[in-house]
Image: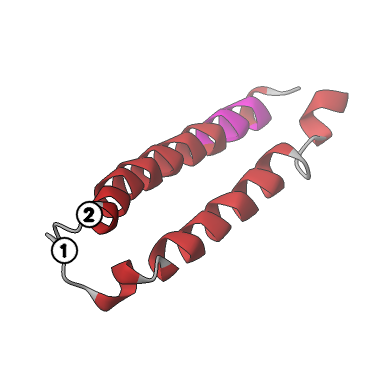
Amino acid sequence: MDYETACTRTRNIKKFYRSLFIFALFAVLIIPDDIFGEKMIHFRWFDSYIFLVIWGFIILTKAVKLFLFDSEWEKI
């Protein structure tokens, strides 16, 4: 594996974990808001969890692309 491939792979993994962490932070803020009924956030999208579902699907797609379909670097 050459240096550029390793740098690109590492950068992509770091970006993936950063976006996963941000998703987890938002989920921790949104889900208890709906469970406990405090309703600190008054957006209609948050009531039906559509925002978290779409964002979760995007993160899942990134994970599949990064860890399953980008395994060429392991063969070198």
Residue that appears at 22% across and 73% down: 43
Q: Residue furthest front?
A: 36
The scheme the figure's colours follow is: secondary structure
The rendered magenta stretch, by its main secondary structure, is classed as helix
Asked if residue 76 can be seen in this view, the reply is: no
Residue that appears at 39% across and 47% down: 23
Disc 2 target residue: 33
* Mark linked to residue 41: 1
Mark with earlier residue (2, 1): 2
Q: Which quadrant would the C terminus be assigned to in this image? A: top right
Q: Nearer the viewer, residue 70 or 61?
A: 61
Crowd class of label 1 (few under 14; some 14 to 19; many from 20; radius 10 Å): few
Whether the residues at callouts 2 and 1 have beta carbons within 8 Å, the answer is yes
Provide the residue span drawn in magenta: 5-11
| Mark toward the viewer: 2 or 1 | 2
Disc 2 to disc 1, C-alpha distance: 7 Å
Task: Indicate the position of residue 48 as horizontal and vertical percent values.
Answer: 38, 71
Count the marks: how many?
A: 2
| Amino acid type, mark 1 | Ile
